[in-house]
Amino acid sequence: MKLNDSNLFRQQALINGEWLDANNGEVIDVTNPANGDKLGSVPKMGADETRAAIDAASRALPAWRALTAKERANILRNWFNLMMEHQDDLARLMTLEQGKPLAEAKGEISYAASFIEWFA
């Protein structure tokens, strides 16, 4: 798989700003439905990791709430811009893991990003 930005291909979960493996080390293989080739794996997170993610989100909420509307809008706008900047790579990843046509995947990225843009 050739991506313009290989950093977009992550095989860990983001919890509290850190990329983590499952506590027990277990993974779930991600395969290409078109040919069965293994693309990578994702951590098989359990209840402990889920609780850690919920707790981290709860701790982050007061800081998010304290931001002005303009500051929050800027963060959302940056997220939208990043999605559009990396639309081709994100669509490639979706196509490989879901088997959907590339043009449809690109459209889905754009569609999802439009919601973020609207809230910005």
Image: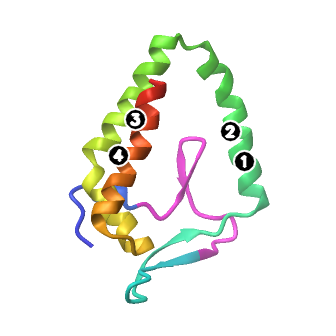
The earlier-in-sequence mark between 3 and 1 is 1
Distance (Cα) linking label 3 and label 1: 24 Å
Kindly identify the residue that appears in the image at 60 percent across and 41 percent down. 16
Distance (Cα) linking label 4 and label 1: 31 Å
Q: Which residue is mark 1?
A: 52
Q: Residue 79 shows which numbered tag?
A: 3
Distance (Cα) linking label 2 and label 1: 6 Å
Q: Is 46 displayed left or right of 70 in the figure?
A: right
Distance (Cα) linking label 2 and label 3: 20 Å
Is the residue marked by circle 1 packed among few (<14), some (14-19), or many (20+) residues within 10 Å? few
Kindly identify the residue that appears in the image at 40 percent across and 21 percent down. 74
Mark 2 in CB contact with mark 1 (< 8 angstroms): yes
Q: Which residue is mark 4?
A: 110
Q: Residue 105 lies in what quarter of the image?
A: bottom left
Is 63 located above or below residue 34 in the figure? above
Kindly identify the residue that appears in the image at 45 percent across and 20 percent down. 73
Give the total number of marks visible in the rendering.
4
